[in-house]
Image (cartoon, rainbow, N blue to C red):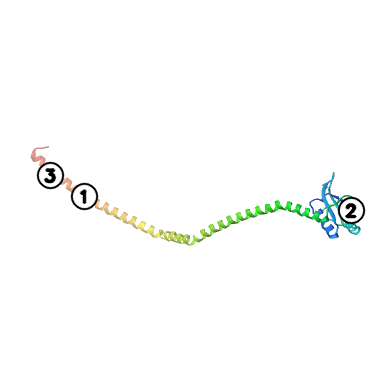
Amino acid sequence: MKLKVKITGPKVHDVGYRYFLMSNAIDLGLKGFHARNRMSEKEQEVIALVEGDEEAIADFRKLVKTNKPEYSDVSEVALEDYHGDIMRTGEYAQVSSAQQLNKAIPLLLDIRNDMKAVRKTTDETLSEIKAVRKNTDMIPQISEDIKAVRKNTDMIPQISEDIKAVRKTGDETLGEIKGLREDIQPGYALQFRQVQSDVRAMKGRLGMQ
């Protein structure tokens, strides 16, 4: 016996409907099977052709009326006798496997490219970790530098005291210089007046005015 099944609905494509029908045809021992997707004027369609003994065909009729893939949305299942040729079930399974592999190849290529990108990112991350580790290894030296700076900073009060002492000594030295100048000036003035008196006396003797 041969049977044609037309399944119509808003969502019967891309939900695994053909593979659902094929796996059940294999399970029932149907020797002929073929399925294809097509579009009607308003809805999606799946057309399936099956061939087998009367009991297997009857079981297939009941199955397609009562079962469907989880994510499908079916409006109608129409059944009618068929008289044309039908592909062997095993041959259709091989064709379906090839179709699935053809769909899978772009996905596998995308996965491969994603893995390359992840590997590149991982390598860059490892390089950054190495750089951070290298900088971390410098922490002891940085700590020693900080200690040296802190030690020099701690000497600032002593330096300040030394500056004050030098300033005080300078002020005292200036005071001493001023004192010497004041001591020298009176004696110098007296000697100058004496010299002036001697010069006038010599001019008088010489008849000079």
Residue at numbered disc 3: 198
Residue at the spot of label 1: 186
Position of the N terminus by quadrant: bottom right
For label 2, the SS is strand
The amino acid pointed to by label 1 is Pro
Position in image of residue 58 (x %, y %): 90, 57
Pointer 1: residues within 10 angstroms few (<14), some, or many (20+)?
A: few
Q: CA distance from mark 1 to mark 2?
A: 150 Å
Q: Earlier in the sequence, mark 3 or mark 2?
A: 2
Q: Which residue is mark 2?
A: 2
Q: Foreground mark, 1 or 2?
A: 2
| Residue at left offset 56%, top offset 56% | 127
- Mark toward the viewer: 3 or 2: 2
Mark 2 crowdedness (10 Å alpha carbons): few <14, some 14-19, many ≥20: many
Vertical placement of residue 143 versus 5, above or below = below
Q: Are marks 3 and 1 in contact (CB under 8 Å)?
A: no
